[in-house]
Amino acid sequence: MALQLITVGLSHKTAPVALREQLAIPQDRVCDLVRGLHDGANLPECLLLSTCNRVEAYASVEDAENGRDSLMRFFTRQTNGTDVIPHLYHHHGRQAVVHLFRVASSLDSMVVGEPQILGQLKDAFARARAAGATGSVLHHALERALSTAKRVRTETAIARSAVSISYAAVELAKKIFGSLEDKTVMLIGAGEMAELAAQHLLGAGAHKILVTNRTYGRAVQLAERFQGSAIRYEDYRDSLIRTDIVIASTAATDYVLTRQDMTRVMHDRRHQPVFFIDIAVPRNLDPEIERLDNCYLYDIDDLQSVVDTNKEERLRETERAHEIIDQEVAAFEAWLRGRAAAPLIVALREHGERFREQEVAKALARLPDLTDEQRQAVECLARSLTNKFLHEPTVALKHATRGGDQTAISIIRRMFGIS
Amino acid sequence: MLPLFYLALTTYFIGTVFSLLYFSRGGHALGRIYLAAVIIGFATHTVLLGTIWVRTGHFPTATHGGSMVFFSWVIITLLAGLEARYRLPVVGSFVLPIAFIPMLYAAFLGQESSQAPAILKSGWFLAHTSFAFLADAAFVIAFAVGWMYLLQEREVKSHHPGASFRRLPPLATLDEINFQAIAIGFPLLTLGILTGAIWAEVVYGRLPFDAKIAWSCGTWLIYGLILNMRQAFGWRGRKAAQLSIAGFALAMFSYIIVNIFFTGFHSFQFFNALKPPGA
């Protein structure tokens, strides 16, 4: 029987966080558990992948059903009594390869396109190798998975667009300012989404955060958290001259900033660009501000529509990613089948060699008076006859195994009496 | 020289086509083909100019075709400098189609007599034309990034940024390159006009005046205005982009149209009609 890949596991798609927590394997225990699977469950090649969103076991086995049962028993043992079976998915053969490549390419991730999974997969493989549980199939599968992930990342735009409102804001800010390094952000009012946006802008390199709020104490509190400065609500307009990004989210029912206000500010700041993010409903910023040169204003609906477009594009890119995965899976499968052909070809050659040796020995026994030269000629004749005779069936066997043509394989087996 | 010229022309054509594909579709492979083609084209182009200079004994700008080949070379040299500093291959998608035009024009001009009048061997001529073409090339860059700025600004202001939003560089970067190009081009243009005046003074003992000189002074005023307005009133972004597009239109008018339709001191016919001194 030929080796094939199997996988059993659970992820954010099939199991609640409570169960994933229970099953998550601490990194320092991975090695021991892999060794246990390898020796205990008699799996020649296996690895364990454990992240916050998934716990999976991969193995290469000859008997998919047996292997699957061992892995499922392993998962059951890991929980303290919870029935884990309904949350487990399992794949074998081609489906298992597709699954591995999808996981590596971050198509199965909670945040599609996030790159951490690649590192986690590499670590998992390194630990399995340290436990002595890897072989050529798993090694080759992992290598292909990593190069598939690389292709998906460079050939599709899957990881390139922001799919949350605060990331969309950061992406826009970067396209307006280039670098955010010397940029000052002002929060007018506080709210969960405004804080998140500020957090992401800081993460993207923004220089300073100013916070203003009707309740000054709240502004001070927030400013402390971002290591920025609090500004009294009455005075915040004076600070606009040194503010590059404004995030407004007050409960005011009227515009807190109008076009007239900004015309003056823009003149004073010599028309350095300003990016306004209006998260408030009703809106805090006069939409007319957008008409000023070097002023860019996005309200919550604009940001949402950017996110929606990005999501649609990501979906389209996912299709392209699947094409890449299909190609890579086909290449891996061909390798696997080619690998399965090797013992058959060896058997075929041995079969021929055995006959050759027997027949040459017989012939030479009957011709004791041959000179060395003549003996060599006889041996040479036998060898080239065998080689020529076996050449075509060897090629046919290679083609048949690469293409998975079982009928041809069994015909060749029967014709040459190879078991 | 002809095989070199056609090799440069062909590789630039390939480079230009792939640079446009690179902008419209994205993708690393297209970008690599485009950059490789331009590198080969530029190397050939450089050898070609050297050959013209050595074989004919005068600076390439002494003939109409030669000056076109030189102009294109200067633009691509500046583009290469820009790429080395900013790593923004997409700028090439806008500059290369422009740099390709003078090369194509040179192909249509065909082979001219390589005999140029002796006064064009003057060092002043070399300085005058080099400065003028360098300035024009800097204005080509300012024009291209100004145009890119307007496209990107439209993307951002549309509130529905699309694919070109992602491929075009940030507004601030485009504005910065635009400013730098003009800040470099303007003094070069000034030097070009000055060296031209001195050269005329040396050769003729008087300052000539023709349509091209008038247009050049107009161009000089526009770019001077752009720089001043930025300094004095913070005219950046869209205003700077629009003005640099207008300035470029004027500069190109002065360069091409005047050369073709107006006669005067700057036409190649003028020099061709000149008898070598002492003949």
Image: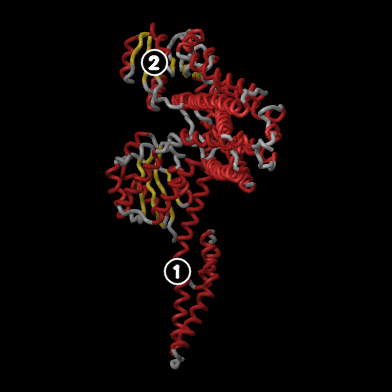
Please identify the quarter of the rendering in which residue B249 is found: top right
Subunit of mark 2?
A
- A264 or B41, which lies in front? B41
Q: Are marks 2 and 1 on the same chain?
A: yes
Q: Position of residue B275 (x, y in %)?
A: 69, 36
Q: Residues within 10 Å of mark 1 (few under 14, many from 20)?
A: few
- A266 or B138, which lies in front? B138
Q: Position of residue A265 (x, y in %)?
A: 46, 11
User: On screen, B79 above or below B219?
Assistant: below
The residue tagged 2 is A190
Q: Are marks 2 and 1 in contact (CB under 8 Å)?
A: no
Q: Residue at x 51, y 30 (%)?
A: B169
Q: Which one is in front in this view, the residue at disc 2 or the one at disc 1?
A: 2
* Color scheme of the displayed model: secondary structure
Q: Amino acid at mark 2?
A: Ala
How much space separates mark 2 and mark 1, taking CA atoms?
A: 73 Å
From the viewer's perspective, tell me whether residue B215 is left or right of residue A392: right
- A110 or B260, which lies in front? B260
Q: Quadrant of the C terminus of chain B?
A: top right
Q: Position of residue A360 (x, y in %)?
A: 46, 84
User: On screen, A88 above or below A389?
Assistant: above
User: On screen, A217 above or below B133?
Assistant: above
Q: Amino acid at mark 1?
A: Val
Subunit of mark 1?
A
In the current view of this chain or complex, which residue is farthest to the front? B278
Q: Residues within 10 Å of mark 2 (few under 14, many from 20)?
A: many
